[in-house]
Image: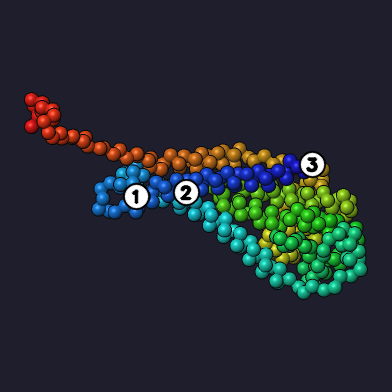
Amino acid sequence: MRGVARSFWVLVAIAAAADGVLVYLAIASLDHVLPCWLTSAASPRPSTGSCGQSVAIFGYHSWVPGALILAFVSASLLAGLWTLLSQIAGTRRALHQLGRPISRPRRLTDAADALGVDVVLIDDPRCFCCCAGALHPHIIISTEMLSRLDQEELIAVLAHERAHVVRRDPARAAAVRVAARALFYLPLAQHLADKALVASELGADSSAIRAAGQDALVGALLKVLGEVRPALGSATEMASLDALDSRIEALRTKRLPAIRPSVWIAAASVIAAGALCTMALWLPPVVPQVVRVPPVQIIHHGPNAPNPSPGAT
């Protein structure tokens, strides 16, 4: 499971590196461009010495490179922020639309106590069980799903969601989606985000198998497939369709899915990263200002003053 789970941390490292480059480019573009913008239009050349010769097509101390870099940085940050806010809003809206909490029956209480988890039973006709909450995750199960599961299958489902609670997977799921949207120019980011979500479900399946056995987990999955479920945003769900094919394949073959990206994803990401790095070369170079000091002429007075040279005036 480690080989699949590392995709989350690889995505985090790529996001941190790419954001670091973008921040550097933003600071560099501000350092080069703002002095040009703040210079008086009447001055033929800025006195700051910070606006050098840009690409010839843009002329002297062009603002175009810096403006494009700042626009690119803003687009990346806005994409990530919009994804985060939409994830939070969508999850909260979905949770508010669920049925009301009711008291738990004895068999659900016994299963929850045996696994040491906090479970909320919702009176809802839809068949679902999920882990919700970024800071304080907890398990929610509907009355419809509880009615379809026997005791072993119920333990498998709760053990699956308990793994999500322990690792705080709702927060991780939101983080990988935000990173993938913010790094929209790197196809590798979306690939790693998908693999990180698959890894989360595969790790939870392993916990369920250890707690109740593979037959109980498969039986629970078969009973909830194709049922109407709420769209829960960043909340993790037992029968999520995002990673279902990979989970079934892993259960059938008992082997982890491959995490290597395709050739075109790797090639496109390398090209995008190279273009990102070369944006720094597009900035106007800093031209140091040379200050010329006129020579100082010393005039001597008095009888000891030297005679002027024949050519002096």
Three-letter amino acid code at disc 2? Answer: Ala
Helix, strand or loop status at disc 1: helix
Q: What residue type is labelled 1?
A: Cys
Find disc 2 in the rendering and name its residue.
26
Q: Which of marks 2 and 1 is nearer the N terminus?
A: 2
Does residue 223 appear to the left or right of 298 in the view shown? right
Identify the element where label 3 is drawn: loop
Residue appearing at x 84%, y 56% in the figure:
159
How much space separates mark 2 and mark 1, taking CA atoms? 15 Å
Residue 226 visible from this viewpoint: no
Q: Name the residue under label 3.
A: 255
Foreground mark, 1 or 3, reads 1
> Which quadrant is home to the C terminus?
top left
Which image quadrant is residue 91 in? bottom right
**Foreground of the two, 97 or 44:** 44
Q: Give the percent coordinates (x, y) of residue 9.
A: 67, 45
- Percent position of residue 96, x then y: 70, 71
On residue 36, the disc is: 1
Between the residue at mark 1 and the residue at mark 3, the CA separation in whole angstroms equals 59 Å
Residue at figure coordinates x 64%, y 47% from the top left:
12
Residue 246 showing in the rendered view: yes
Horizontally, is 53 left or right of 208 in the view?
left
- Could you tell which of marks 1 and 3 lies nearer the N-terminus? 1
Where residue 300 sits, quadrant-wise, is top left
Residue 282 % position (x, y)? 41, 41
Residue 183 lies, in percent from the top left, at: 57, 49
| Left or right side of 258 for 116 | right
